[in-house]
Image: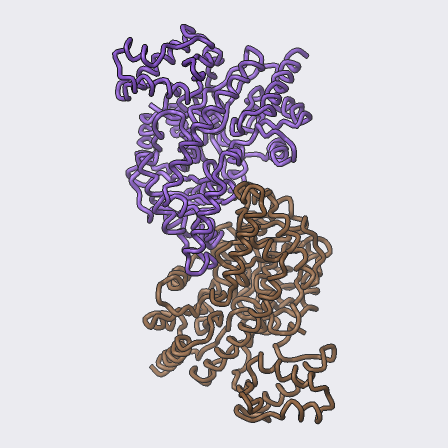
Chain colours: A purple, B brown
Amino acid sequence: MNTTNAGTHTDHDFLYLQVADRLEKQIGQGVLKTGDKLLSVRSLSREQGISISTAFNAYTHLEIRGLIEARPKSGYYVRFTPTQYPEPLLVEKPANEGREVSTDEMIALVYKAMSDEGVVRLSLAGPSVDLLPKARLTKALIEAIRESSNSCINYEQLQGDQRLRQQVAKLAFNWGGNVQGDDIITTQGCMEALVFCLKAVTKPGDTVAIESPTYFSIFNVMQSLGLKVVEIPTDPVTGLDISFLSEAIKRTKITACLFVPNFNNPTGSCMPDENKKRLVNLLTKHKIPLVEDDIYGELYFGRNRPRTCKSYDKNGWVLLCSSISKTLSPGYRVGWCIPGKYKAEVLKLKLMHTVSSATPTQAAIGMFFSKGRFDLHLRHLRKALYTQCLQHMKAISDYFPADTCVTVPQGGYVFWIKLNRKVNAFQLFKKAMEENISIAPGQIFTTDARFRNYIRLSFGQPYDKKIERSMKILGRLIKEIIEN
Amino acid sequence: MNTTNAGTHTDHDFLYLQVADRLEKQIGQGVLKTGDKLLSVRSLSREQGISISTAFNAYTHLEIRGLIEARPKSGYYVRFTPTQYPEPLLVEKPANEGREVSTDEMIALVYKAMSDEGVVRLSLAGPSVDLLPKARLTKALIEAIRESSNSCINYEQLQGDQRLRQQVAKLAFNWGGNVQGDDIITTQGCMEALVFCLKAVTKPGDTVAIESPTYFSIFNVMQSLGLKVVEIPTDPVTGLDISFLSEAIKRTKITACLFVPNFNNPTGSCMPDENKKRLVNLLTKHKIPLVEDDIYGELYFGRNRPRTCKSYDKNGWVLLCSSISKTLSPGYRVGWCIPGKYKAEVLKLKLMHTVSSATPTQAAIGMFFSKGRFDLHLRHLRKALYTQCLQHMKAISDYFPADTCVTVPQGGYVFWIKLNRKVNAFQLFKKAMEENISIAPGQIFTTDARFRNYIRLSFGQPYDKKIERSMKILGRLIKEIIEN
């Protein structure tokens, strides 16, 4: 259910969601238009034969999703018509040969642009710090240090802070997992977890299957580990093309896979649960380990947290990696992995590469989680992100050319946008930088020259006048490129 | 001067040190024996034609070094006679072929033993937390977070906290360095710095020269990076045998070196400054990068901080690595490197492997340094370590067999001890573990089966009844092994 576009609910859902879905369809089909007044809660209740509170919940749901708005002393109005959403993207089929990953000047430039002062960072696939609970996190840190008999000054045990691991195990319940604290190894952010897991299951020269398009840092990591990649095409809604992968396994010796099934970066896709199960079965059959990056999994716009591939993993072939960098604090560098049958290898790598993870920051996050503060924070964050998603989406509709195609994110931080064929995204990137706007050009999400007319835009920053202005400028730049 | 055994001072030193040296010699030669009463400060002043304060300083110096003691209302007495020190070790010449590093079951066992509860950790080459400024560090952390506009919640810049880097650059003055904050990259402890630097200067299959014996974790790192090693013999006082290295370079393609010139682990040796200069010249001539681990450099028992190889590096071939794990807090995981001409490569590796280092802990250490608290703390720590060194040394003299040879550490945390040829150190390790005492057996400091009758003992823990008892038991176990 979370694996389809946000907004489609089935019989299994609560009544208010069914009502909301039907209303959303009417909005989608243009039956209800932007600015239309909706029935009052009382009238809706009477007409549909539902309780007042069900009617109210249905409206509230649509309101949270940004589709309608409540005007004081007036009632509910349609706010935004999603028929303005351009059509979803076609899947692009990449070539299927293993090849050396080459470093990209472009990636360096994009990274540099991200850290320049005064730049509007539409390229950053992460949260604005304004969305994060600074004071509560500081409080948890101080509490954790006070509680520690040696003020968190000494080495943490190799596997990681015990309370943090227990809390991460508890969180696993939400994605269908059944893990213990002892199954978990903490790391310095998700990237370190990915590196350790990849190192644990491969050796230099091996080939790893990744999604196409894929997060650009992954190419650097692969290159650094001496690995080759096979890019597997993805659907912008359902993610990985499992049949393509299945064929690729027959033709190429694939040693491991690295996928981002939930709210993929850059496409925002979410693999349906049945696909996850199929994928895990396929890989288990071929004894191919799957490194699963679930860093965005908590940031769903639907009703439930999507499951993970790990939740279907009976034999330990899935190594799940995640962190708090996209939900709580990028700066604390607290991540973890659940490496299944590769626990001993990952522990050994952690010991030799970093000895142990930082004690105070792990203890702080363990404390924050154990006080139940994470759940509350996530609820606020999801709401804010979904609103921002719709606001940015509206700006794309308003300011970008009519032939723009954009994915409908089901969670996470990013849009994957296909522009007119005349647009070279890297050229657009350079022009945008002259206006102090950073975007991520499509070319950096692949190892060959595809996606040249794609860009990734983030909606992680609260939508304000500066963003509005930047979106307007971007739209103008795109139009200028097309016209020249 | 810091590069010879502690206790030998030259004309360049202050007058009180010359007086102290002469007294130390008398103690060393048995002219003054344990329990002998020394001249009063007034008499010493009169007899030597020195000021009262010079006489007082000389006695204080010897007292700090544990050689004499002041008894209330009585005067100064000789406390310990260093003629009891066994002779220094002979250099062992290892074979000189490049070879694959193999993992060692023993290393895993020693690591495991270190983290067992209730074990007296004579195997841990680091500080007791009782020697570390817990409260002041917590204070610095809170100050740093309060000062940060976003409570240290966001990513730190890739190169690392700016204030921390500036402070590390300031510290470089003490080891003869002339570096700027911009030359420095922060890391998650020294181990991460070593891994990044090694990766920056090698590729899998390359051969790296290391010291023999060498810190056992180094072998794991080399194996993980797919590197071969050539072990270069060392002298227990002056460290690396440069002539041997020079010959090895002619015979083997050595891609890089990884050395610990100051207070080597496990030998405690300190390379004389002129040797450092020679080494850097040799490597520069052959364009071989040197990864220099200076993690123990601040923990000198002599009068001055020893210089580093980096201080002689004119062309950027030396990549200096260090951290606060041995001086301030192992748990904060704050380290750095000064990678010379390899800065861009190391930055790239840092980006792809960990994105950035943790913000709060870096900010805390930067704050702690900037308040001038590090210098004060180091003075206390050095004094404590030197006292502990002498106390442990005395226990070795008292309880170990007479044919025991032990290095005289010039700084750092460890003794390198040669036992009777009949002793298999790994057997001793197992017997000691039955008594809840962990030691590091010599076999784990090399890739072949040498050093089987050597052990490394740490004096990082304050000398108390528990340690006293453990040293006594160790001595008994050694004697039992020899007798059976």
Residue at the limit of the structure toward the top, as seen here: A31
Q: Quadrant of residue B349?
A: top right
- In the picture, the quarter occupied by the N terminus of chain B is bottom right
Considering depth in this image, is A467 or B334 the residue closer to the camera? A467
Residue at the limit of the structure toward the front, as seen here: A73
Q: Position of residue B338 (x, y in %)?
A: 64, 53
Considering depth in this image, is B34 or A466 the residue closer to the camera? A466
- Is residue B440 shown to the viewer in this render? yes
Q: Position of residue A22 (x, y in %)?
A: 34, 12
Count all numbered tags in the image, as a single digit.
0
Q: Quadrant of residue B426?
A: bottom left
Q: Quadrant of residue A480?
A: top right
Left of B121 or right of it: where is B337? right
Point 61% across, 53% down: residue: B337
Where B29 sits versus A416, above or below?
below
Q: Position of residue B18 (x, y in %)?
A: 69, 83
Q: Position of residue B240 (x, y in %)?
A: 61, 67
Point 31% across, 37% down: residue: A173
Left of B416 or right of it: where is B303? right
Where B258 sits versus A389, above or below?
below
Point 62% across, 72% down: residue: B238
- In the picture, the quarter occupied by the C terminus of chain B is bottom left
Point 46% across, 16% down: residue: A88
Considering depth in this image, is B240 or A213 the residue closer to the camera? A213
Where B56 sits versus A349, above or below?
below
- Is residue B255 shown to the viewer in this render? no
